[in-house]
Image: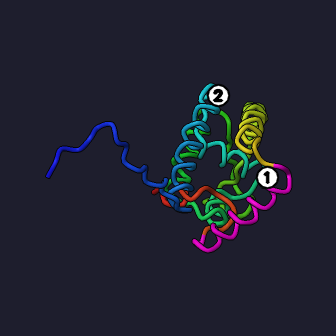
């Protein structure tokens, strides 16, 4: 057995190619950067998602929103409590059931949501800049099918569904 010649380069292994690995790596990188995008607003991505859901369904009961988004009730209560303390959300009593609370954005919540949405849209444009419009639509369609195959329905982020 002779010594290896350090001047002779070993053939490089081809890069590991796997859809799951690439999606995991992209998800990690995008998640970290999205936290940075929302950081100056002191808003977490899950809080942003919940504010958007309330804005889209103003006055919806808290429990109905949690169920529709497949969010655990305990996580929902915790995040709504936090957003209410920051005066971004308000709970109002239901007209017929005093145990139920309806969710509404406050004026401060609406303002913060507009700022966060602008930042999110700018970030999305940065992420998708290398793609043509046709490629972007194809990617969205394909990723939607992958998500569906994993049982992820449109709505809340998968991480919000697993909390609690």
- Disc 2 marks which residue? 41
Residue stretch rendered in magenta on the structure: 132-151
The residue lying at 48 percent from left, 56 percent from top is 16
> Looking at the picture, how far across and down is residue 148, in whole percent?
65, 71
Q: Earlier in the sequence, mark 1 or mark 2?
A: 2
- Disc 1 marks which residue? 56
Q: SS class of the residue under badge 1?
A: helix
Occupied quadrant, residue 139:
bottom right
On screen, residue 140 versus residue 76, left or right, reads right
Compared to residue 140, the image places residue 40 above or below, namely above
Compared to residue 38, the image places residue 146 above or below, namely below
Q: Residue furthest front?
A: 2
> Looking at the picture, how far across and down is residue 4, in whole percent?
23, 44
- Mark 1 or 2: in front is 2
Give the camera-side residue of 76 and 1.
1
The residue lying at 85 percent from left, 56 percent from top is 134
Give the quarter of the figure containing the C terminus. Answer: bottom left
Give the camera-side residue of 145 and 151.
145
> Looking at the picture, how far across and down is residue 141, in whole percent?
76, 65
The residue lying at 71 percent from left, 37 percent from top is 123
Residue 110 appears anywhere in the view? no
On screen, residue 25 versus residue 128, left or right, reads left
């Amino acid at each position: 057995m002779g010594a290896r010649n350090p001047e002779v380069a070993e053939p490089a292994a081809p890069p590991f190619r796997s859809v799951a690995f690439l999606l995991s790596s992209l998800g990690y990188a995008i998640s970290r950067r999205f936290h940075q995008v929302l950081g100056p607003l002191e808003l977490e991505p899950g809080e942003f998602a919940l504010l958007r859901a309330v804005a889209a369904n103003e006055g919806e009961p808290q429990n109905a929103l949690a169920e529709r988004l497949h969010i655990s009730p305990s996580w929902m209560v915790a995040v709504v409590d936090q957003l209410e303390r920051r005066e971004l959300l308000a709970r109002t009593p239901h007209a017929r059931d005093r145990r139920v609370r309806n969710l509404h954005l406050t004026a401060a919540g609406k303002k913060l949501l507009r700022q966060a949405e602008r930042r999110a849209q700018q970030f999305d444009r940065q992420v998708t800049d290398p793609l043509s419009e046709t490629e972007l639509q194809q990617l969205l369609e394909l990723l939607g099918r992958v998500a569906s195959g994993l049982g992820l329905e449109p709505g809340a982020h998968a991480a919000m569904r697993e909390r609690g």
